[in-house]
Amino acid sequence: MKIQEADAKSLLKAQGLPVPGWELARTPDQVREAAEKLFRQGTHRVVVKAQVLVGGRGKAGGVKIANSPQEAFEVGRRILGMDIKGITVRKVLVAEAVDIVKEYYLGAIVDRASQRIVLMASAEGGVEIEEVARTNPGAIHRVEANPELGLLAFQARSLGLAIGLRDSLLNQFVAIAQGLYATMKANDADLVEVNPLGIVDVAGPDGNASPRLLCLDAKITLDDSALSRHPGLEGMRDLDEEDPTDAEARKLGINFIHLDGTIGCMVNGAGLAMTTMDLVKHYGGSPANFLDVGGGARHDVVCGAMELILADPNVKAILVNIFGGITRGDEVAEGIIEASRSQDRTVPMVVRIVGTNAEEAARLLREAKMETASSLDEAAQKAVALSKGIAQ
Ligand code: GDP
Ligand code: MN
């Protein structure tokens, strides 16, 4: 689950990381109010940032600086409602705009190859790290944290030295890198990214400016499978940006991934679902989705899953492949029959149900005059033909 910058920043702050304060706003008036508040606290400029779950907002015009509350209002009016990579901006973050001396990149990811949390840093910050990886991979430095001991200070220091930090900035960097690691662990995150991590001149009490590192942007992806361990994080799911299909699938408790083919697949078991998709491809078709209705799928779940498949206008045929173990074939058959009766458009369907109560299922399907297949190969071939409008 991706979370918005503002939520990501609050998770960083909870681990003691230096993040400039911010306010959220949903209307230009709220942007002005937020800016007024910051100006009262002594800020001279604010930055208004689109809150959308995509990178490169800066380049897309979704990050703008304003020198007065009135200017913030105008900037807010321009950014709110803007379309960034297909997403409508519904809220913005308003924060003190700091004078950035230099921008760095710092990120932590779960690296499945090394089975470690890997910290990555680069002096080429600000731009998207994928671009740096492509054009100048040598500019990205990495260290692997130890699964028992965590990210040790010397490791963080070697990373800081590699990107050219020294003295006080190096010490600050060590604390931030370790804080990033702590954020990963505390929230079961897959990715925590700060880009830019900026050097900013901050005036001290003596009036002399001293350089400080601040987390100016934050991106966090949480491990969906670990969300149940963090009930507080569920509230960070941004329903504004969630695909309605994904929300529906989550409610039904099924695994549904939308793809761009024409054959809707309803299968129980992730492995069987993949095999089904492979066979569809093998026989020259293309799957419209991955769907695992799970073991013991009850008929209301089957009905809901069918509606999700049919909601995709590209679907030209449906392939149902159920291996009844815990799942009872007759119950799935009933669900399919009910779902196909209630649909508003008729899409040809091939059903293959084997295993528990297969005979009962076959009888129900026969009575409902549904197309069946006894083997998976046969089912896949039929579905491909139907998807191409070839009558059986
Ligand atoms: P992204 O483009 O989606 O990654 O959004 P960022 O939050 O990284 O903002 C893009 C760029 O805006 C940064 O790389 C900075 O150059 C600039 N920016 C962001 N916050 C501030 C700020 O407080 N002060 C200044 N001067 N620039 C900022
Ligand atoms: Mn950024």
Image: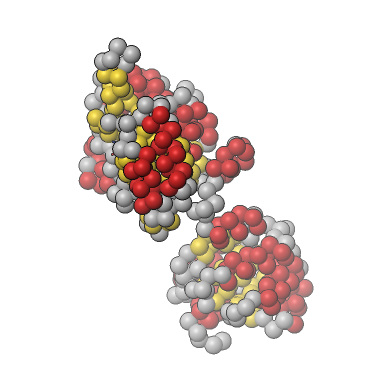
Residue reaching furthest bottom? 391
Query: What scheme was used to colour the molecule?
Result: secondary structure
Q: Nearer the viewer, residue 313 or 62?
A: 62
Give the residue displayed 33% in from the left and 13% down from the top.
Answer: 205
| Residue 388 x/y as whole percent | 48, 81
Image height check: is 332 above or below 17? below
Give residue 112's quadrant in the image.
Answer: top left
Vertical position of residue 35 compared to residue 255: above or below = above
- Picture mark count: 0
- Identify which residue, 3 or 90, lies in the foreground: 90
**Res. 114 in view:** no
Res 33 visible: yes
266 sits to left or right of 9: right
Does residue 12 lie above or below 4 as drawn?
above
Instruction: Residue at 67%, 81% (x, y): give it.
Output: 370
Location of residue 216 (image quadrant): top left
User: Which residue is located at x 55 percent, y 57 percent?
Assistant: 246
**195 and 272: which is toward the camera:** 195
Residue 71 spot, x, y in % from top left = 33, 43
The residue drawn where x is 54% and y is 66% is 276
Residue most toward the top? 206
- The quadrant the C terminus occupies is bottom right
Residue 67, horizontal then vertical, whole percent: 30, 38
Q: Position of residue 48 (x, y in %)?
A: 37, 42
* Relative depth, front residue between 241 and 80: 80
